[in-house]
Amino acid sequence: MAFAELFLLLFLPGLEGTKISWIAVNDTLMEETVQHNTKLNTTTPLTFGVPVCNQECPKVIRVGWIEAKPYIFYENKENITRSNSSKTGKMASNGSVGTKTATAQTFSDDSTQHTIKGIFNDILKSAVNLCCAQRNCNQTQVSFAPPATTLQTLNINLMRGEYDMILPVHICEGANSYHGYPYVHLMNSPGVVLVVQKSRKRVEKTDKLVETLQEAWPVVMVTLLLTIMAGITIWALDTYKNPVEFPRSFPHGALEGCWWAFVTMTTVGYGDRAPKSHVGRVFGIVWITVGLAVCSFLTATLSSALTTTFVKQPESIMGKKIGVVDKFGFEVAVQQGALPKEYRTLRNAYNALVDNKVEGLLLELYSGSHFAAEHGGLEIDRNINSPYSLGIAASLDPNLTTTRRCLQNIQRYKTSAIVKIIERYARTKNTTLTDKSSPDDAVRLFDPNSERLRKMLYVLSTVVGLMCIMGILYEILRMRFSHSVKTAVACPAEHADDSLDGKLRRLERALSDISDELRRVKLQRQKADNMADMAFATPEIRQ
């Protein structure tokens, strides 16, 4: 307030003794009314040093708009009444500033009352109230037309003179006109966001993980071939010195060599196989060194593939089909190398996203965050820094010149008040832009909701079930066979001749073998006793 008073006193000489009163409007912007005292003998109100009543303001400002949360949108009147009742009449007291309150039209749609809310609505009503609705001046009414469906419709109606102003519109930073029409800057937008489907994003990440693992097959093949080569080599070098651990049979010996090579490469080293020859041991040292490098390379490749997939990184939209609803989104998509597909309305773009006709939507940052928050199946994938200006386009009507200049001054000197309005609407809905690390953001190969996991579990369950059934059948057959053998033993009449003869012959052979072995052992014992007697005989006996 002190700054405004100093501004008036410095740039408008002769206002010494002027009384400056500040009246709150819509709880945001502050109305400045300069009233001269009796020494000046006038009651001409001033706004930013401009005597408004000396310059005409239109009685009605016709505003065309397109619904875009949080900038301007319809809100149910019943909900507003319910929410305002908890504020102890604060909004009612702020909105009643005599005849100076600029009001917006209220429309009826299917017997349901709606009122217009939003950032631009609050700023425009307060700004017009500040510029044109001063005491002792005619009341200026802001009349909102029914919302248009497309921005192109607004532009056409502005050209035809049906609207005095249209909003919200955007231009590049540094520009001062909107298609040749005067432009009033209200705020800056940081850029656009890419809105995607949560389910599609999860599937894409899982597919990328599987694809990355599949692309690592050359490394696996090289490792396998080197292991086989090392196994065959160690078999060839050590089989003659160590035929027990590396048999001379090529299939058997080569397999044992491959087992040794694999265990050695992974540094497990069971020790059940080890080269004995000098050449084999030298090759073992070489393979240990080479195997460490090969195993490390395989591990690093798989780890890098998994890390690239699991770590949350902004993905490029180059070459992807991206839906846009305005010219600016189209330009950003082209700059990013995407394939933009323009839609007339946001609803059409949303339907295309749900039907997988596009992979994402490029929307203005605040609008995109509101849109994603209202649809549970959507989320913000990334934001693209591409700042531009948001504001109001005015017609070329000379009667709006003063109002337009006043609005531009308000934006310049009332930045903090405008920021408060933006924060009030953007604070609660902009939570989706926060970069959080949540379980849903992680790429999970074994996602419970994954169709691929369900199929894999189905296949594995089927295989395990078949194996169990085969095992049960095997056990039944084994038990039946065992029972039949027991039955045959219990009933010798059925197999008396064959079974008894065979057993007797085997028994006779066994007894004969035992008898022969006993005789051989007996002879060896006698020889050993004779040799012992001769060794320990006395010299006299020897003579």
Image (cartoon, rainbow, N blue to C red):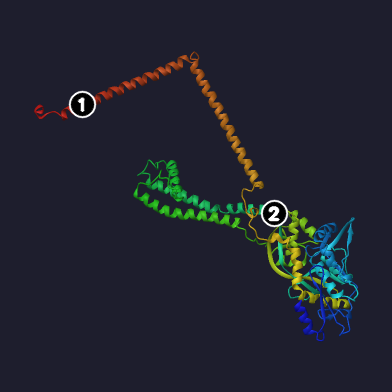
| Along the line of sight, the residue nearer the viewer: 484 or 66 | 66
Quadrant showing the C terminus: top left
Q: Residues within 10 Å of mark 1 (few under 14, many from 20)?
A: few
Where residue 10 sits in the image (x, y, percent)? 77, 84
Task: Find residue 166 and report its horizontal and vertical position in percent.
Answer: 84, 69
Is 378 or 502 nearer to us in this picture?
Answer: 378
Q: Residue at x 87, y 83 (%)?
A: 38
The mark closer to the camera, 2 or 1, is 2
Q: Which residue is mark 1?
A: 529
Residue 326, x across and y down, in percent: 78, 65
Distance between the Cα atoms at labels 2 and 1?
Answer: 95 Å
The residue under label 2 is 198
Foreground pick, 461 / 223: 461
> Does residue 281 appear in this view?
yes
The x and y percentages for residue 98 are 88, 70
Q: Earlier in the sequence, mark 2 or mark 1?
A: 2
Horizontal side of 506 relative to 178 (left or right) equals left
Quadrant for residue 337, please give it.
Answer: bottom right
